[in-house]
Image: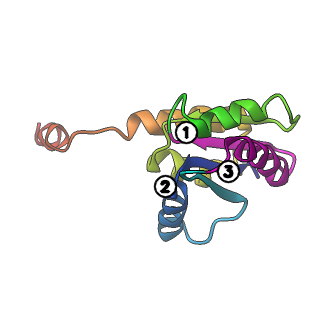
């Protein structure tokens, strides 16, 4: 099973995982790490690398970062030079992406799962009234 790691500002990832458990039930091999105001970024980067190593069960780790170019994302990038565990990192974490990852991670390899999650993120963006009007046609 591919493990999942959520890297976010504050407790956003924790809330996302808790919400996913409301929908799916208990989730295994998933972890959240939040970067809080005043945290040492060097320590956070080291902890991210350790978490990726710890979560890996041989099939890799899918890392989600909340924002491209921000510190959680940068921590995942820095970790890449210090670990040999296979992992992918997707930015722009959304609930559809997370649900896709958690439900498909046993039936896909890491590359396939990454692609599925990115598509779920794109396809999950809808505007209410446009959707309502398209169902009337």
Which residue is depicted at the point 87% across and 46% down?
A: 58
Which residue is depicted at the point 64% across and 65% down?
A: 27
Disc 2 is placed on an element classified as: helix
Which residue is depicted at the point 11% across and 42% down?
A: 136
Q: Where residue 22 sits in the image (x, y, percent)?
A: 48, 70
Looking at the rendering, in which quadrant would you find the C terminus?
Answer: top left
How would you rate the neighbour count of disc 1 (Cα within 10 Å): few for under 14, some for 14-19, many for 20 or more?
A: many
**Magenta run includes residue 97:** no
Q: Where residue 103 sits in the image (x, y, percent)?
A: 59, 54
Closest to the observer, 113 or 68: 68
Q: What residue would you read off at disc 1?
A: 117
Q: CA distance from mark 2 to mark 3?
A: 15 Å
Q: What residue would you read off at disc 3?
A: 4
Q: CA distance from mark 1 to mark 2?
A: 18 Å
Which mark sits nearer the N-terminus, 3 or 1?
3
Segment tinted magenta in the rendering = 39-66
How would you rate the neighbour count of disc 2 (Cα within 10 Å): few for under 14, some for 14-19, many for 20 or more?
A: some
Q: What residue would you read off at disc 2?
A: 12
Q: CA distance from mark 3 to mark 1?
A: 12 Å
Locate residue 13 relative to residue 30 in the image: left or right: left
Closest to the observer, 46 or 26: 46
């Amino acid at each position: 099973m591919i493990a999942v790691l959520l890297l976010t500002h504050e407790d956003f990832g924790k809330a996302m995982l808790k919400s996913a458990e409301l929908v799916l039930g208990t989730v295994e091999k998933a972890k959240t790490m939040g970067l809080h105001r005043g945290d040492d970024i060097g320590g956070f980067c080291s902890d991210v690398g350790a978490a990726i190593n710890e979560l890996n069960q041989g099939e890799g780790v899918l890392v989600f970062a909340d924002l491209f170019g921000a510190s959680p994302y940068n921590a995942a990038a820095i970790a890449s030079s210090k670990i040999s565990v296979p992992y992918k990192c997707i930015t722009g974490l959304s609930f559809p992406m997370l649900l896709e990852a958690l439900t498909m991670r046993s039936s896909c390899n890491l590359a396939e799962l990454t692609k599925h999650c990115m598509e779920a993120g794109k396809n999950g963006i809808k505007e209410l009234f446009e959707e309502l009007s398209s169902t009337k046609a």
